[in-house]
Image (cartoon, coloured by chain):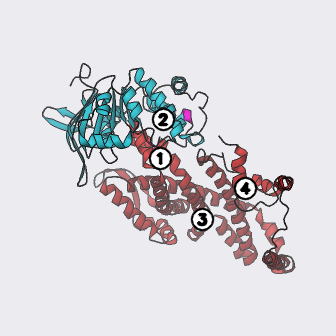
Chain colours: A red, B cyan
Amino acid sequence: MSAQGEAIEAAEIKAIPVRHPGRWVSVAVIGVLVAMLIHSFVAQPHYRWGLIRQYIFTGPILHGVALTLELTFLAMLVGIVGGVLLAVMRLSPNPVVSTASWVYIWLFRGTPVLVQILLWYNISYLFPTISLGIPFGPEFVTWQTNDLISGTTAGVLALGLNEAAYMAEIVRAGILSVDEGQFEAASALGMKQSLIMRRIVLPQAMRVIVPPTGNETISMLKTTSLVSTIAVSELLQHTQAIINVNYATVPLFLMASIWYLAMTSVLTVGQFYIERYFGRGSSRSGPAATLPERLWRAIRYNRPPPGALAMQRRDQSGGL
Amino acid sequence: MTVSGDHPMVKAEAVRKRFGSNEVLKGIDLEVQRGEVMCVIGPSGSGKSTVLRCINHLEKINSGRLSVDGQLVGYEQRGDKLHECTDREVAKMRSQIGMVFQHFNLFPHMTVLGNIIEAPTRVKGQSKDQAVAKAKQLLEQVGLDGREDMYPRQLSGGQQQRVAIARALAMEPKLMLFDEPTSALDPELVGDVLDVMRDLAKSGMTMFVVTHEMGFAREVGDKLVFMDDGVVVEAGTPRDVITNPQHDRTKSFLSKVL
């Protein structure tokens, strides 16, 4: 009896696994759909892959891609800096400052971004000149608004100022997510408000801020296509210029989509590493695994059940 | 206003504090002399932590006088008028008072070393080398040498609390406030933290300790105060208060915790 007991303890369990026929059915359905799609890509001549290949790396398209990236970067810069400022204002004990921030967010979040783009492009109708001087008093320098605000500038301003309203709410949520004890501990050490915000609160708020900001950046990259309406020659504008010549509408829009998809993919990877940086110190098991690392583990450990990866990682880090 | 001399390190006279309509301190009088260890005990909700938080102006008092080292906390007397201190003045006062929290409140995104050198370098303007050397010495003092590069979450609660003590000491404070420093710890980790505090008391640090550790209060404390319902019920040497309490409320509290 006891010998049998030992044998049971020593041997690893070898049981017949539960079969999942439903999984095989879903794999088959998805497989057929993918096959149909690929067949359409190959057999359907209207995709005109040759035309796409011919144009995808040409000068105008590459310039358009570069400008799209530039617009995304600058608009997000305006958006993030403005968003942090608005969030801090919103949390200010001064009711006027707090309300000013609220009104800004209400205004810029409540109107369509396309309308804002068109308004900024036509801003010279309201403000023909821009001057530096004393309000309601003498002016020292004056510019023509149309000289100062080009289509690209109008685009960056419109997209960035609109984005700031959304970023403000994201940053505010991040700031509020930081434990009040952090603020107290820093205050007790004699740190001043601005220093606490910069060194203690915002770095911790980043863990909450980064994921939605990644979303916003990806969204912004696509939204920049709206400035094609004010003759800014970004990717979509260049694409449409070519379409106006050769009428190859669908193939060239597909080509633009391929570019947008490629750019957003790169941003997605970048987001992962930024999240990993700001997550430092947040878990006992060290930094999160990269996608290749996770794939490698998935293969090596032969399909672990859901949740097991996290447990394995914890085990590997080996206690304290 | 005199800054040195024979005035007490902490002096509270008729201090009152309200949260909304709820009065949590109903006229507190206390004195802590330089180099003394004052322990405050009492049931939860008695206002003992609030007193501590008023001392470094994390809470504003509503009436009475509260001074640290001869200087009013949060206000300045000019002529016959009280002026509120600016944020900068409050920060400067706080930088001379160390505080240790029940839940440690270490900065989780910084290493142990980063936690300790943050305030000395950015508030006092010490050079990084100087601050790091001091931090290493403090870590040795609290028995955690070699843990500089770990993050707070990789440490046990007792270790975190000792880092928090080192972080406060790095500012070379003249007064240390402890807000139930061992209440959030597993029982077997309490001893290490109390050992560090005992050594600190021996070195002559002025300490204001809100605690439930009667053994510590009896052994290390110079004064013991029992608070209940926003008032000081009884004060004296720990031996007198613990072995010979005069008030019924003190007796009933002690019978529950001893």
Mark 3 sits on what residue? A219
User: Magenta part of the protein: which range?
Assistant: B101-113
Mark 2 sits on what residue? B164
Image spot of residue A214 (x, y percent): 60, 58
Q: Which quadrant holds residue B125?
A: top left
Q: Nearer the viewer, mark 3 or mark 4?
A: 4
* Residue B137 among those drawn in magenta: no
B223 or B50, nearer to the observer: B223
Q: Chain letter of disc 1?
A: A
Image spot of residue A231 (x, y percent): 58, 68
B16 or B59, nearer to the observer: B16
* Residue farthest toward the top in the current orientation of the protein: B5
Disc 2 residue type (three-letter): Ala
Q: Is residue B110 above or below residue A5?
A: above
User: What kind of element bears circle 2?
Assistant: helix
Quadrant showing the C terminus of chain A: top right
Residue B56 is left or right of residue A226, and the answer is left
Disc 1 residue type (three-letter): Val
A113 or B227, nearer to the observer: B227
